[in-house]
Amino acid sequence: MGKVKYLVSRIAGLNYKQMFQKIDEVHEKSGKAKVRIFLDMVYCGIAYQAGYMDYALFEMYNLNRRQRKTVVTRGKNNAFMKRFNDPKYMPLIENKLSFNTLFSKYVKRDWLDLSKATFEQFQAFIERHAVFMAKPADGMCGKGIEKITASEHDAKTLFAYLNAHNLTLLEEVAVQHPDLMALHPYAVNTCRVITLLKDGIVHVIAAYLRIGNGNIVDNFNSGGMVVPINKETGRIEYPALDKAGNLYEAHPLTGVPIKGFVIPLWDQVLTLVKEAGLIAPQVGLVGWDVCVTKDGPILIEGNDFPGHDIYQLPPHRTDGIGVLPEFEKVINS
């Protein structure tokens, strides 16, 4: 019944213009007839809960039935969210101010809730931190974040600007490990680690390194790139990919090799997310954004609806196999 309801809701909300644009894109890449693509797209929607965006992004037109069954599609990801994350508790993770309060032990940096701060408290904060990050409390995908140098602004004007633009979370800048700084120094390159809490145990499902590319954010949907991390070793075994489909064996700005890069202090990263995953057990499936510093890992934020779009991108699959078996291994254990 859940699959049927999902399919009906997706059909009702379809952007048909965008869908046919995706059909055109797939036709150009694959050479397959548009009618055949359309019918296969509909089939994948019914059989695998894959929308037209999934169909194109994960190149499901190149996969056989066995491989398609292993892909975490939007419908399957939504089902995981409904099963493991209680909506009443999701704001604890979604709202960055609530998150910083609840997970302060792992945030490990100074921050200020501007919505509750006086001008004098704001002044004290910018005196402590000449450069700081300003974020929307409810922002997503790295959008709206600004890196601000306080000395370049009049304090009262800046105070008014931040409030007017809903940039109410001010944070001390996280300083990443020298190895990650060498890879890309303009953004904090975070590890996105997906965990699932089952029977009181936090399991690491998958991990990815998100790498900036000249911007102050590393998000895949905001100009950055992504690559899987071997969750056992912390080693990167594939080239990184950006949303335009470009592959990078080495970083285009710094020349530092990406394939073969080892995340520093990886054992500490795993320990951190396994501890953090127990704090709000009502939200059992979380994507943690972790910054590794020279003194150990710290949490940047949590995602109670971790985007499935980075899970199993075509250049990052071995034999076309997606991430679903990793979820099933834990869920069925």
Image (tube, rainbow, N blue to C red):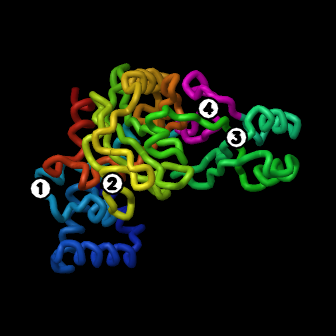
What is the CA distance from the residue labelled 2 to the residue labelled 4? Answer: 33 Å
Mark 3 sits on what residue?
170
Q: Nearer the viewer, mark 3 or mark 1?
A: 3
Q: What is the x, y in percent for residue 182?
A: 46, 41
* Residue 119 magenta-highlighted: no
* Quadrant position of residue 53: bottom left
Element assignment for label 4: helix
Q: Residue at 41% x, 23% y: name it.
A: 274
Element assignment for label 1: helix
Mark 1 sits on what residue?
65
Compare residues 187 and 273 and report the one nearer the observer.
187
Disc on res. 86? none
Instruction: Please name the amino acid that badge 4 sits on.
Output: Asn
Instruction: Please name the amino acid that badge 2 sits on.
Output: Tyr
Precedes in sequence: disc 1 or disc 4: 1
Q: Nearer the viewer, mark 2 or mark 4?
A: 2
Task: Give the extent of the magenta segment.
Answer: 90-111
Instruction: Please name the amino acid that badge 1 sits on.
Output: Arg
